[in-house]
Amino acid sequence: MSRDFSKTIIQTLRHHGFQAYLVGGCVRDLLLKRAPADFDVATSATPAQVMDLFPDTYAVGAQFGVVLVPLPESEREGTAENAIPKAQAVEVATFRSDLGYADGRHPDEVRFSQDPREDVVRRDFTINGMMLDPVTGNVLDFVGGRADLEAKLIRAIGDPDRRFVEDKLRTLRAVRFASRFEYEIEAETLAAIQRRAREIQAVSRERVRDELTKMLTEGQSRRAFLLLDETGLLKEVLPEISAMKGIAQPPEYHPEGDVFVHTLLLLENLPYPCPPTLAWGALLHDVGKPATFRVAPDRIRFDRHVEVGVKIAEDICERLRFSNHDAAQVLALVDNHMRFGHVWRMKESTLKKFMRLPGFDQHLALHRADSLASHRNLSTYHFLQKKLQEIPPQQIRPAALISGDDLIAAGYIPGPRFREILETVEDAQLEGRLHSHASALEFVRREFPV
């Protein structure tokens, strides 16, 4: 989609006498024969010159030499004006060098350049530091990126300490790239991450959350969290997960090992692609266990670990600035994951109410992964799958047979009793004992006389 458009941009820039190349992650992905998520262009043209050539350009970071050139309107997928997403635009950045990084994220000053080599050496990792001529297919590799792709290495460009001082988020990005591609982190780069792990505290919580979410959803989350632990980043960004290490579990229920081992195995069994809320719910489902661990006479116990876990998960969601919608789903996953153990004993009404939880497919996916990471018994999962196929949606969430207005018309006085009456009627309806408005009113008069 935007590959052809980025090539057009490059040809236009060159026609007007400027240098221009594809750069960064899209070059890496093309060399790996992966589909890039987006395409970035680096050029000798200044932001003002780029905007002169492309009138619809969005100056999203012109002070740093970065502008967005949106796809032609006919090729965009339903977007509002002034709200063009990155996937439907090409980022065009002027060759530059960066001077100082006082905030550990953005350069204090940039100096535009005519030299592509000068632009590349300020970037993060060698595999992200190559440029590609889309016309000839020639690769400009000033940093050994192709060799590191072949060696499956994540290596900082130049001095790794300097790269991580410039942008402290790069330590997390190193872990994410190593996990996604199943590469190793080069020894000096790894040592620099370990030395500077505490500096991740200076990065905004939203950016940390976004990196962690990508690790959780890109298909290699178990490896990512092992690397987070190895680098020392885990105890900095999610100390509650680090606290799971060494917390033993009853072997009759969890032969796989401690809470940390179980959680990482669970992550490995999540579906791919994985919704972010499911991934976070899975990561946090047992977050209350370290605080509730005790050795009872009969076995290891975690009394009230769900309630404690919900509170800890709530704190994490607040700290990492989750949206209210996403936080609610993550907390619901933590709150309900133990209810699957009671499914076989649930009344029909209770079971149907359970199955109509918002996003129940995520609850079911979490239970499946939880089971595969422990006892590997999927009988409850298959039972619920069968129920979902057999029971029509309108029987799981039927229209109410009566309302509060009906109770008032029948002579009942509004008050707390209304909720009890309506819930009792709904239960009887879900269990197949009531089927009509008239039968429901008759039931109420009999069970709840005025």
Image (cartoon, helix red, strand yellow):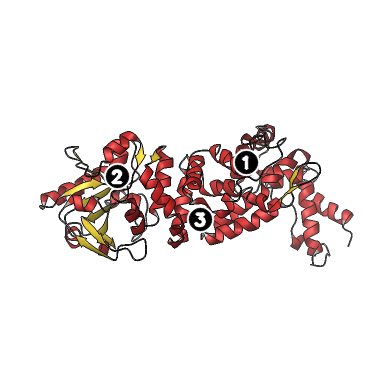
Q: Nearer the viewer, mark 3 or mark 1?
A: 3
Percent across and percent down for residue 197 are: 45, 54
Q: Indicate the secondary structure of the residue bearing disc 2.
A: helix
Q: Foreground residue, 133 or 185? A: 185
Amino acid type at image mark 2: Thr
Percent across and percent down for residue 420 are: 80, 58
For marks 2 and 1, the one nearer the N-term is 2
Q: How many neighbours does mark 3 have within 10 angstroms: few (below 14), some (14-19), or many (20 or more)?
A: some
Contact between labelled residues 1 and 2, with CB atoms less than 8 Å apart: no
Q: Foreground residue, 222 or 270? A: 222
Q: How many neighbours does mark 1 have within 10 angstroms: few (below 14), some (14-19), or many (20 or more)?
A: many
Amino acid type at image mark 3: Glu
Whether residue 281 appears in this view of the structure is yes
Give the CA distance from mark 2 to mark 1.
41 Å
Location of mark 1 (residue): 364
- Is residue 166 shown above or below 128? below
Q: Quadrant of the C terminus?
A: bottom right
